[in-house]
Amino acid sequence: MPEERLQKILAHAGIASRRKSEELILAGRVSVNGATVTELGSKADLSVDKVKVDGQLLSAPKHFVYIALHKPKNVVTTVRDPQGRQTVMSFFKGMHERIYPVGRLDYASEGLLLLTNDGDFANLMMSPASHVTKTYLVKANGILSPEEEEIFRRGIPMHGRRTAPAGLKLIKKAVNPWYEVRLVEGRQNQIRIMFKHFNHLVEKLRRVKIGFLELGDLKPGAYRTLTNAEVARFRKLMKMDEPGTEAEDKIGR
């Protein structure tokens, strides 16, 4: 087996996403053959080298797992939480495979969340370059004007960078209206910040669709395994099986 960058090895082993794996390396929590590694360009061969994270020896996953979860509100979308809050991993205590969340869904939000141990799949799913649309139902405490709706769709300044073009549709007109919002990026608290830009607060937020995959009738805290056909459809959507579309190539080295 050829040498690979450590962040890719960690992602393939189901430790975390590629981005989170980079943070583990920089924090000095990864070692190769007993030596701590803190440089992101470092490589190893999992078939011959002993790679450890927090002292735990890694091994490549025997098979890939893809799961759709209905994340409830007030649950953290991380593997562990320093504050001791409930994380999405609490719903998978009996699972042998080391899976992790694909992207994030804010603490106060609920809805569809994917988990996997396939690093390439996770990285491409989180990349705006893959153009996988996420669809949300949002209840706000006030209605946007037609002019504000157009600004929302074009993008607003957020942390020094404009948000990508978004889909927005009023689906229930009321004092506290409901909107359908479609995004191809998922920056932290993005939808809440976008509505706050127009002096409105988000009262409820539920992700109901990722790409073609719908939340359906999954109850909060319930999950199911994706079918082979669904996984194949996602791979086709993200062009995973085409030459030159490795996750690291799509996202950037």
Image: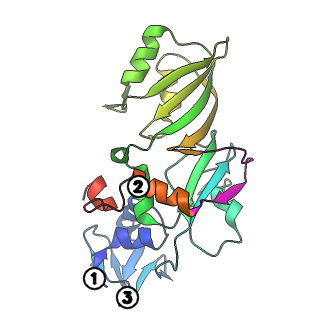
Quick one: quadrant of the C terminus?
bottom left
Q: Earlier in the sequence, mark 1 or mark 3?
A: 1
Which residue occupies 49% across, 69% down? 15
- The amino acid on which the numbered mark 1 sits, given as a three-letter code, is Pro
Q: What's the mark number on residue 47?
A: 3
Q: In the image, is 171 to the left or to the right of 185?
A: right
Under circle 1, the secondary element is loop
Which residue occupies 68% across, 56% down? 223
Taking the view exactly as shown, the residue that stands out farthest to the bottom is 48
Q: Is residue 201 above or below residue 72?
A: above
| Region of the chain picked out in magenta, as a range | 214-227
Under circle 3, the secondary element is loop
> In x, y percent, where is residue 94?
71, 72
How far is disc 2 from disc 3 in space, using C-alphas?
A: 29 Å
Residue tagged by mark 2?
236
Residue tagged by mark 1?
2
